[in-house]
Amino acid sequence: MEKIRVTIYNEFHHEKIHESVRKVYPDGIHAAICSALEQDGRFETKVAVFEMPEHGLSQEVLDNTDVLFWWAHCLHEPILDEVVERIHKRVLEGMGLVVLHSGHASKIFRKLMGTGCKVKWRESDDLERIWVVKPSHPIASGLPEYFELPKEETYGEHFDIPDPDDVVFASWFSGGELFRSGCCFERGNGKIFYFRPGHETHPTFYDENVRKVLVNAALWAAAPGGVYQTYGHWLKDNYSK
Ligand code: ZN
Protein backbone atom coordinates (compact mmCIF):
# COMPACT_ATOMS: atom_id res chain seq x y z
CA MET A 1 0.00 0.00 0.00
CA GLU A 2 1.25 3.48 -0.82
CA LYS A 3 2.24 5.51 2.18
CA ILE A 4 0.50 8.74 3.13
CA ARG A 5 2.88 11.64 2.55
CA VAL A 6 3.02 13.92 5.59
CA THR A 7 5.00 17.15 5.84
CA ILE A 8 5.57 18.44 9.37
CA TYR A 9 6.14 22.17 9.64
CA ASN A 10 7.63 23.40 12.92
CA GLU A 11 8.93 26.95 13.21
CA PHE A 12 11.82 25.47 15.29
CA HIS A 13 12.55 28.62 17.25
CA HIS A 14 11.87 28.00 20.96
CA GLU A 15 14.08 24.91 20.90
CA LYS A 16 17.04 27.01 19.80
CA ILE A 17 16.71 29.85 22.31
CA HIS A 18 15.21 28.26 25.46
CA GLU A 19 17.04 25.59 27.42
CA SER A 20 13.73 24.62 29.09
CA VAL A 21 12.31 23.68 25.69
CA ARG A 22 15.48 22.02 24.40
CA LYS A 23 15.44 19.79 27.48
CA VAL A 24 12.03 18.42 26.49
CA TYR A 25 12.52 18.41 22.70
CA PRO A 26 16.29 18.18 22.07
CA ASP A 27 15.77 17.47 18.36
CA GLY A 28 12.83 19.84 17.97
CA ILE A 29 9.08 19.42 18.39
CA HIS A 30 8.93 18.22 14.78
CA ALA A 31 11.09 15.20 15.67
CA ALA A 32 8.58 14.05 18.30
CA ILE A 33 5.62 14.47 15.92
CA CYS A 34 7.59 12.73 13.18
CA SER A 35 8.41 9.77 15.41
CA ALA A 36 4.73 9.28 16.32
CA LEU A 37 3.85 8.97 12.63
CA GLU A 38 6.92 6.93 11.66
CA GLN A 39 6.23 4.48 14.51
CA ASP A 40 2.83 3.78 12.94
CA GLY A 41 4.35 2.72 9.63
CA ARG A 42 1.64 4.07 7.31
CA PHE A 43 3.30 7.43 6.67
CA GLU A 44 6.25 8.84 4.81
CA THR A 45 7.35 12.01 6.61
CA LYS A 46 9.23 15.14 5.66
CA VAL A 47 10.18 18.10 7.87
CA ALA A 48 9.95 21.81 7.07
CA VAL A 49 11.20 24.61 9.34
CA PHE A 50 10.93 28.39 9.22
CA GLU A 51 14.55 29.00 8.26
CA MET A 52 14.49 26.89 5.10
CA PRO A 53 14.01 28.72 1.79
CA GLU A 54 10.24 29.27 1.38
CA HIS A 55 10.00 27.76 4.92
CA GLY A 56 10.57 24.34 3.33
CA LEU A 57 7.15 24.59 1.70
CA SER A 58 7.85 24.99 -2.01
CA GLN A 59 5.14 24.23 -4.54
CA GLU A 60 6.86 20.94 -5.25
CA VAL A 61 6.84 19.93 -1.57
CA LEU A 62 3.17 20.82 -1.20
CA ASP A 63 2.23 19.07 -4.44
CA ASN A 64 3.72 15.93 -2.92
CA THR A 65 2.06 16.34 0.49
CA ASP A 66 -1.17 14.59 1.47
CA VAL A 67 -1.29 16.09 4.96
CA LEU A 68 0.53 19.11 6.36
CA PHE A 69 1.07 19.41 10.14
CA TRP A 70 1.61 22.91 11.57
CA TRP A 71 3.25 23.84 14.88
CA ALA A 72 4.15 27.51 15.33
CA HIS A 73 4.08 30.15 18.02
CA CYS A 74 6.45 33.12 17.65
CA LEU A 75 6.88 33.36 13.92
CA HIS A 76 3.34 33.67 12.58
CA GLU A 77 3.59 37.10 10.97
CA PRO A 78 6.97 36.61 9.22
CA ILE A 79 5.62 33.64 7.23
CA LEU A 80 5.70 34.65 3.56
CA ASP A 81 2.24 35.51 2.26
CA GLU A 82 2.93 33.66 -0.98
CA VAL A 83 3.53 30.47 1.03
CA VAL A 84 0.26 31.00 2.91
CA GLU A 85 -1.55 31.43 -0.43
CA ARG A 86 0.07 28.27 -1.74
CA ILE A 87 -1.00 26.21 1.30
CA HIS A 88 -4.51 27.68 1.14
CA LYS A 89 -4.84 26.66 -2.52
CA ARG A 90 -3.57 23.14 -1.76
CA VAL A 91 -6.09 22.74 1.08
CA LEU A 92 -8.92 23.74 -1.25
CA GLU A 93 -7.56 21.17 -3.72
CA GLY A 94 -7.72 18.45 -1.07
CA MET A 95 -4.52 18.51 1.01
CA GLY A 96 -5.23 17.81 4.69
CA LEU A 97 -4.07 20.25 7.37
CA VAL A 98 -3.51 19.45 11.05
CA VAL A 99 -2.98 22.59 13.12
CA LEU A 100 -1.46 22.09 16.55
CA HIS A 101 -1.67 24.16 19.73
CA SER A 102 -0.54 27.80 19.18
CA GLY A 103 -0.94 27.27 15.45
CA HIS A 104 -4.48 28.58 16.07
CA ALA A 105 -3.03 32.07 15.55
CA SER A 106 -1.18 31.25 12.32
CA LYS A 107 -1.93 33.13 9.13
CA ILE A 108 -3.04 29.98 7.33
CA PHE A 109 -5.50 28.89 10.05
CA ARG A 110 -6.98 32.38 10.36
CA LYS A 111 -7.33 32.63 6.58
CA LEU A 112 -9.10 29.27 6.37
CA MET A 113 -11.39 30.08 9.31
CA GLY A 114 -12.11 33.70 8.41
CA THR A 115 -12.24 34.70 12.11
CA GLY A 116 -9.73 35.95 14.68
CA CYS A 117 -9.12 32.46 16.17
CA LYS A 118 -8.24 34.04 19.53
CA VAL A 119 -8.30 32.19 22.85
CA LYS A 120 -7.78 32.88 26.56
CA TRP A 121 -4.49 31.42 27.82
CA ARG A 122 -2.43 30.96 30.96
CA GLU A 123 0.80 29.13 31.75
CA SER A 124 0.23 27.72 35.23
CA ASP A 125 0.87 23.99 34.78
CA ASP A 126 -2.80 23.06 35.10
CA LEU A 127 -3.86 19.47 34.58
CA GLU A 128 -5.73 19.04 31.28
CA ARG A 129 -8.44 16.38 31.02
CA ILE A 130 -9.31 15.73 27.40
CA TRP A 131 -12.74 14.20 26.94
CA VAL A 132 -13.79 12.35 23.80
CA VAL A 133 -17.11 14.01 22.94
CA LYS A 134 -17.62 12.31 19.56
CA PRO A 135 -16.65 8.63 20.04
CA SER A 136 -17.88 7.65 16.56
CA HIS A 137 -15.38 9.94 14.85
CA PRO A 138 -12.30 8.30 13.26
CA ILE A 139 -9.97 10.67 15.13
CA ALA A 140 -11.26 9.21 18.42
CA SER A 141 -10.46 5.65 17.32
CA GLY A 142 -8.75 3.58 20.02
CA LEU A 143 -8.89 6.29 22.68
CA PRO A 144 -10.35 5.97 26.19
CA GLU A 145 -13.32 8.07 27.34
CA TYR A 146 -10.87 10.70 28.47
CA PHE A 147 -7.16 11.06 29.00
CA GLU A 148 -5.11 13.47 31.04
CA LEU A 149 -1.98 15.51 30.58
CA PRO A 150 -0.60 16.28 34.06
CA LYS A 151 0.74 19.70 33.06
CA GLU A 152 -0.23 21.83 30.09
CA GLU A 153 -0.75 25.43 29.16
CA THR A 154 -4.39 26.41 29.72
CA TYR A 155 -6.56 27.64 26.86
CA GLY A 156 -10.06 28.88 27.59
CA GLU A 157 -13.24 29.64 25.67
CA HIS A 158 -14.31 31.54 23.89
CA PHE A 159 -12.24 30.17 21.01
CA ASP A 160 -13.04 32.53 18.15
CA ILE A 161 -13.58 30.03 15.33
CA PRO A 162 -16.58 29.35 13.10
CA ASP A 163 -18.73 26.46 14.36
CA PRO A 164 -16.71 23.31 13.58
CA ASP A 165 -18.24 20.50 11.49
CA ASP A 166 -17.37 18.19 14.37
CA VAL A 167 -15.92 18.62 17.85
CA VAL A 168 -14.09 15.41 18.73
CA PHE A 169 -12.42 16.50 22.00
CA ALA A 170 -13.26 18.97 24.73
CA SER A 171 -10.80 19.88 27.48
CA TRP A 172 -11.34 20.68 31.12
CA PHE A 173 -8.51 22.31 33.07
CA SER A 174 -7.93 22.10 36.80
CA GLY A 175 -8.13 25.91 36.89
CA GLY A 176 -11.73 25.70 35.67
CA GLU A 177 -11.54 26.57 31.95
CA LEU A 178 -13.20 24.61 29.16
CA PHE A 179 -12.00 24.43 25.58
CA ARG A 180 -13.05 22.79 22.29
CA SER A 181 -9.72 21.07 21.81
CA GLY A 182 -10.30 18.84 18.78
CA CYS A 183 -12.18 20.56 15.95
CA CYS A 184 -12.85 19.40 12.37
CA PHE A 185 -13.51 21.62 9.39
CA GLU A 186 -13.86 21.16 5.64
CA ARG A 187 -12.76 23.84 3.20
CA GLY A 188 -13.12 23.12 -0.51
CA ASN A 189 -11.87 19.58 -1.07
CA GLY A 190 -9.66 19.65 2.04
CA LYS A 191 -10.06 18.58 5.66
CA ILE A 192 -8.66 20.53 8.59
CA PHE A 193 -8.20 19.34 12.16
CA TYR A 194 -7.24 21.63 15.02
CA PHE A 195 -5.78 19.93 18.12
CA ARG A 196 -5.12 22.03 21.20
CA PRO A 197 -2.40 20.44 23.41
CA GLY A 198 1.29 20.76 22.68
CA HIS A 199 2.89 23.61 24.62
CA GLU A 200 6.64 23.65 24.03
CA THR A 201 7.75 23.20 27.64
CA HIS A 202 5.62 20.08 28.26
CA PRO A 203 6.34 16.55 26.97
CA THR A 204 2.86 16.34 25.39
CA PHE A 205 4.01 14.94 22.05
CA TYR A 206 5.47 11.88 23.80
CA ASP A 207 2.12 11.00 25.39
CA GLU A 208 0.75 7.78 23.89
CA ASN A 209 -2.82 9.06 23.58
CA VAL A 210 -1.69 12.30 21.96
CA ARG A 211 0.43 10.28 19.52
CA LYS A 212 -2.63 8.19 18.68
CA VAL A 213 -4.55 11.39 17.94
CA LEU A 214 -1.75 12.57 15.61
CA VAL A 215 -1.91 9.28 13.68
CA ASN A 216 -5.73 9.28 13.55
CA ALA A 217 -5.77 12.92 12.44
CA ALA A 218 -3.30 12.26 9.62
CA LEU A 219 -5.36 9.29 8.42
CA TRP A 220 -8.60 11.29 8.55
CA ALA A 221 -7.20 14.43 6.88
CA ALA A 222 -5.44 12.60 4.05
CA ALA A 223 -7.16 13.07 0.69
CA PRO A 224 -9.56 10.19 0.03
CA GLY A 225 -7.96 9.57 -3.38
CA GLY A 226 -10.91 10.92 -5.39
CA VAL A 227 -10.47 12.96 -8.54
CA TYR A 228 -9.96 16.68 -8.08
CA GLN A 229 -13.19 18.13 -9.44
CA THR A 230 -13.49 20.19 -12.59
CA TYR A 231 -14.61 23.74 -11.91
CA GLY A 232 -15.64 26.43 -14.38
CA HIS A 233 -16.77 25.93 -17.94
CA TRP A 234 -18.23 22.42 -18.33
CA LEU A 235 -19.46 20.78 -21.54
CA LYS A 236 -22.22 18.19 -21.40
CA ASP A 237 -20.28 16.17 -24.01
CA ASN A 238 -17.74 15.36 -21.32
CA TYR A 239 -20.20 12.80 -19.93
CA SER A 240 -19.81 10.59 -22.99
CA LYS A 241 -16.01 10.66 -23.04
ZN1 ZN B 1 1.82 27.31 24.18
Image (tube, rainbow, N blue to C red):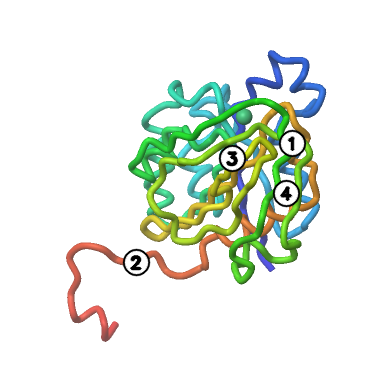
Q: Which residue is mark 1?
A: 31
Q: Which residue is mark 4?
A: 210
2 or 3: tag closer to the N-terminus: 3
1 or 3: tag closer to the N-terminus: 1
Pair 2/3: label in front: 3
Whether residue 150 sits left or right of residue 74 in the image: it is: right
Label 2 near label 1: C-beta < 8 Å?
Answer: no
Question: How many marks are shown on the rendered structure?
Answer: 4
Residue 226 circle label: none
The residues bearing labels 1 and 4 have C-alpha atoms spaced at a distance of: 15 Å
**Residue in view at x 42 percent, y 26 percent:** 80
Residue type at mark 3 is Glu
The residues bearing labels 1 and 2 have C-alpha atoms spaced at a distance of: 35 Å
Q: Which residue is mark 3?
A: 177
Label 4 near label 1: C-beta < 8 Å?
Answer: no
Q: Position of residue 205 (x, y in %)?
A: 74, 41
Residue type at mark 1 is Ala
Label 3 near label 2: C-beta < 8 Å?
Answer: no
The residues bearing labels 3 and 4 have C-alpha atoms spaced at a distance of: 20 Å
Whether residue 31 sits left or right of residue 188 in the image: it is: right
Q: Position of residue 11 (x, y in %)?
A: 59, 27
Residue type at mark 4 is Val
